[in-house]
Image (spheres, rainbow, N blue to C red):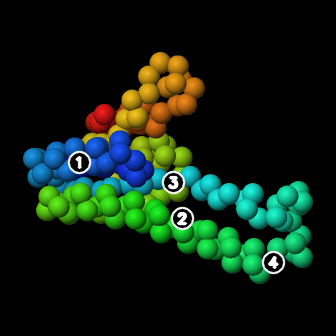
Amino acid sequence: MKILACTDGSEHSRKALVKAAEIASGCRADEVAVIYVYEDTLDISAFPMFELGSITKDSVTKEDVEKMQQLRDELDAQRNKILDDALEIFDQKGIKAKAILKQGHPAETIVDVAAENNFDMIVLGSRGFGGLKKILLGSVSNAVLQEAKKCSVLTVK
């Protein structure tokens, strides 16, 4: 069995990782991967040049470029920490898991990675939204559940 466990660093995803580790241990999974999908959301409002409405060669300073790179580095470090923390859950149970870091729409990317790599099961957290909130806010777990055609999906509350 191949298991794809999803994380976003939240408490909901932590519970899902613990459950995925239990399942992987119990069935002696052939492969376990932990995926973190992020949408690139660098806040450009921190850069005065974007307030002008258009960027020219002269409007971008060396400091702006350095600040942008620093923000990207900080985001990369946060993403890697989320994955490292997730892998630790599996490591504590003696389960070897690999990390997958992807940029994109979370639900679509999770489903695509699962299909491309022939995972048997996707395990992810559920935020527990229901009713109107679910309709208005959307739900990664619901979208994965609806779109994953070739594998089982376990949502953990």
Amino acid type at circle 4 is Thr
Q: Which element carries disc 1, helix, strand or loop?
A: helix
Judging by the rendered image, the residue that carries numbered circle 4 is: 61
Disc 2 residue crowd, few under 14, some 14–19, many 20+, Cα 10 Å: some
User: Of 136 and 154, which appears nearest the observer?
Assistant: 136
Which residue is found at the position 47% from the left and 53% from the top?
37
- The amino acid type found where label 3 is placed reads Tyr
Disc 1 designates what residue? 18
Using the numbered discs, state the Cα–Cα distance from disc 4 to disc 2 in whole angstroms: 21 Å
- Element on which disc 3 rests: strand
- Which is nearer the N-term, disc 1 or disc 4? 1
Of the two numbered discs 3 and 4 in the rendering, the one whose residue sits closer to the viewer: 4
On screen, 142 above or below 97?
Answer: above
Label 1 sits on what residue type? Val
| Tally of numbered tags | 4
Image location (x, y in percent) of residue 103: 52, 56
Say which mark, if any, is on residue 38: 3
Q: Residue at x 69, y 78 (%)?
A: 66
| 122 relative to 44 in the view: left or right | left
The residue at which mark 2 appears reads as 75
Determine crowd level at label 1: few under 14, some 14-19, many 20+ residues with C-alpha closer than 10 A: some
